[in-house]
Image (tube, rainbow, N blue to C red):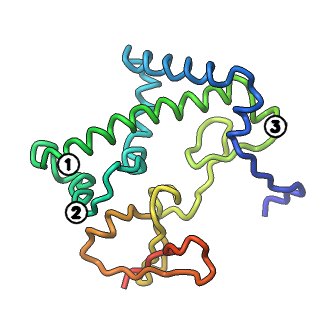
Amino acid sequence: MLCFERQLRIFDLSEMEKTIPDFSKRFQEKVRLLEEMYKQGDLKIREAYNGTLDAVLRIIAPRKNDTVLLMDVYNDHLPDDSVSETVKTIREDIRQRARASIFQYHAYLRVRDDVQYLEKVVPRAVALSVSPKPNRLGVIPVNSECVRLPYHGVPVHDPSRGVFTIEYLIDLQRSPLSYSAVYFKKDKEEKPFYYIIR
């Protein structure tokens, strides 16, 4: 549609770690620097942190896989002072790991940009992003109805509106609506490909 004649190529960003001799050192230094800047109240770092926090809190895997407990862990309507000690402990663990992963995520991207890795691997490329920013073309990964990225939740089809959205699985489990799981017969994961509202 854009009249591009070249191939679409996908690169595994982790390959960057092998090509930069001191990658680990650079990465750890960036993590430390970002944490320090956050503590000092740097507005850009705090904005980046806060813009990432809600999504990351939902994608950090809890160490306990008890559905009943997780209903309370992920229930935003239950404040910490109204839940059990176990739920509080799980929430705090998720928060701590989310905090660490946010700094690691942003540090990784900063190292990538510092060494101009993308420019070296794909010179003159058009950068795409699900979070538009200067010099990156914004793309909508599913449709404009989705407020979550595809890998943060599960696809849900609403036949009454004829639309797919991405929802957190825990929200489907607590919803008063009825859902059916739709599978592909030859899918090796044997997990639902999407859910449909009945």
Q: Are marks 3 and 1 in contact (CB under 8 Å)?
A: no
Please name the residue that numbered disc 2 is placed on: 68
Task: Categorize mark 1 by other alpha carbons within 10 Å: few (<14), some (14-19), many (20+).
Answer: some
Which label's residue is closer to the chain start, 3 or 1? 1
Task: Categorize mark 2 by other alpha carbons within 10 Å: few (<14), some (14-19), many (20+).
Answer: few
Which label's residue is closer to the chain start, 2 or 1? 2
Q: Decide: is 62 above or below 16.
A: below
Out of 184 and 43, give the one closest to the viewer.
184
Instruction: Tell me the amino acid under the disc marked 1.
Output: Val
Relative to 61, 79 lies left or right: left
Q: CA distance from mark 3 to mark 1?
A: 45 Å
Q: Decide: is 78 above or below 153.
A: above
Relative to 169, 135 lies left or right: right
Task: Categorize mark 3 by other alpha carbons within 10 Å: few (<14), some (14-19), many (20+).
Answer: few
Quarter of the rendering occupied by the C terminus: bottom left
Which label's residue is closer to the chain start, 3 or 2? 2
Tell me where residue 103 appears, x and y as whole percent.
47, 29
Instruction: Tell me the amino acid under the disc marked 3.
Output: Val
Q: CA distance from mark 3 to mark 2?
A: 47 Å
Tell me where residue 39 appears, x and y as whole percent.
37, 17
Secondary structure state at the residue bearing disc 1: helix
Tell me where residue 16 appears, x and y as whole percent.
72, 34
Residue 121 — which label?
A: 3
Please name the residue that numbered disc 1 is placed on: 87
Residue at the image position 37 percent from the left and 45 percent from the top: 57
